[in-house]
Image: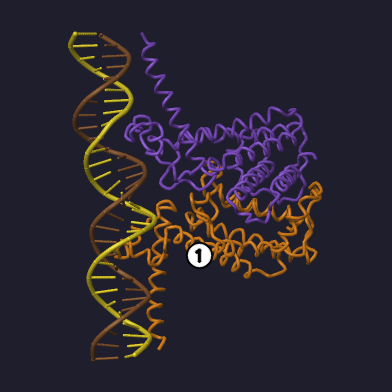
Chain colours: A purple, B orange, C yellow, D brown
Amino acid sequence: MSSSRTARERVRAELTREITDIARRHLATEGAGGLSLRAVAREMGMVSSAIYRYFPSRDDLLTALIIDGYNAVGEAVENADAACPPEDHTGRWLAVCHAVRDWALAHPHEYALLYGSPVPGYQAPQDTVAAAVRDTVVYGRIVSDAYLAGALNPPAVCPPVPAPFSEDAARVRAIIPDVPDDVIVRGLIAWTGLFGWLSFELFGQFNNTILDTGTAFDHSMRCQAAFLGLPA
Amino acid sequence: MSSSRTARERVRAELTREITDIARRHLATEGAGGLSLRAVAREMGMVSSAIYRYFPSRDDLLTALIIDGYNAVGEAVENADAACPPEDHTGRWLAVCHAVRDWALAHPHEYALLYGSPVPGYQAPQDTVAAAVRDTVVYGRIVSDAYLAGALNPPAVCPPVPAPFSEDAARVRAIIPDVPDDVIVRGLIAWTGLFGWLSFELFGQFNNTILDTGTAFDHSMRCQAAFLGLPA
DNA sequence: AATAAAAGAGAGCACTGCTCTTGACGAGCC
DNA sequence: GGCTCGTCAAGAGCAGTGCTCTCTTTTATT
């Protein structure tokens, strides 16, 4: 019978989940550096060495948390996008911007784990980059949809795209298909601008200068939309 | 005679400097999390407890490194700005962008310490924020100079600045004086875009998609300049 | 029921930041 | 010149960490 084996595997999956849950809670209060396997084990009523049956190292636990985090923000972004009328490209862009900001404000330490400085000595395995692009394809699809619908009218202020960029642009088209190089550049700028803002806001770089961050963020993202060529 | 006392203080200053130098080297190789007081003491041929005569805690050492780092990037930016003709505002903007990028690429771990996730449990003292704005005033002066010279012709695509932003804008004017609210918004966007790009590049968020980062960065910053209204 | 696989328990290693106490050295005062 | 006092290095020690062993217990399969 394989049901007995399934029973064992079920309790294993259960415990694995419990470990990541506790770890995520510790992460939320202490930050990535303060995440301690022993503390997690203690809270589970386990001895520390037993944790290693489930996660061979601290980095593997972090990897699991990172993948979960990318999926969480990806799901939030997907939901926000899906809640908008598909042809309202500007609304979709603003919705996903606010979705990722809301998630980041609700999970600042997880945001730092995903988008902040890489934890020292930790090399992100390939599994994480697959999850990392989940939100990116949503941004890309919005831009792509708008372009294909003829709804993109960017201001003609940028200098011509330099020739050597075309190779990179071709790779980006795997995520934002069917758009010309100059649109890709604007997409990159909006993308880095979005996360640049969030990192500054969450990491305290505004230094009590921007207090009404909600207003400023919303307006900045509207400007980014205008720069992308999305209609007001 | 106070020269004897000065002698004592001189060797103290010397040792303090040696500690920060070694710590900075460790930081460059191991990252902020791997910075160990004991390792620094070992390399100095000192016993670990002696370090605490000079830095009462690990956080105080980090604070010293952070302040040094902000000053280093501030100085690099100042020099790059000063090397340009004052009326070439676009050239000055591009120069400071490349200066901060060059510094970041040369000191990635220090960059992470300054602009990445805050180290857990570490609260930046007020001394650091004073040093942190050193580069910011340079960006601000470039925008301000260009505006006052009438050289700023931003594309009219942004929606009107929302009224609640005016309070924050007034605070920002302490750094970028004499500019209207909409210019401040564009300055903020360019500023967050610059560091958003650098963080993505240094923290590996581009995931081997953008390989010729130098070309892409330069062009992005030219687009930011155009969005700011700086002449091509 | 016997056997093989999986999981928990415990001790231990090398490391960390940090504190406390002890002993030595040197500068200032009488 | 001798004495005192503040500064400094050294050492031991505490509580904590990640991680690796070995040993025992539990569970599932044959």
Q: Chain of mark 1?
A: B
The residue pinned by badge 1 equals B68
Residue type at mark 1: give it: Asp
Write down the quadrant of residue A18 in the picture. Answer: top left
Q: Is residue A22 left or right of residue A203?
A: left
Write down the quadrant of residue B47 in the picture. Answer: bottom left
Residue count near mark 1 (Cα–Cα under 10 Å), binned few <14, some 14–19, many ≥20: some
Where residue C27 sits: x, y (%)?
Answer: 35, 83
Q: Mark 1 falls on what kind of element?
A: helix
Where residue B116 sits: x, y (%)?
Answer: 53, 51
Where residue B229 sits: x, y (%)?
Answer: 76, 56
Along the viewing direction, whichever of A63 and B81 lies nearer the viewer: A63
Give me the residue at 69% from left, 48% from top: A213
Q: Quadrant of the C terminus of chain B?
A: bottom right
Q: Quadrant of the N terminus of chain B?
A: bottom left
Where residue B93 sits: x, y (%)?
Answer: 66, 61
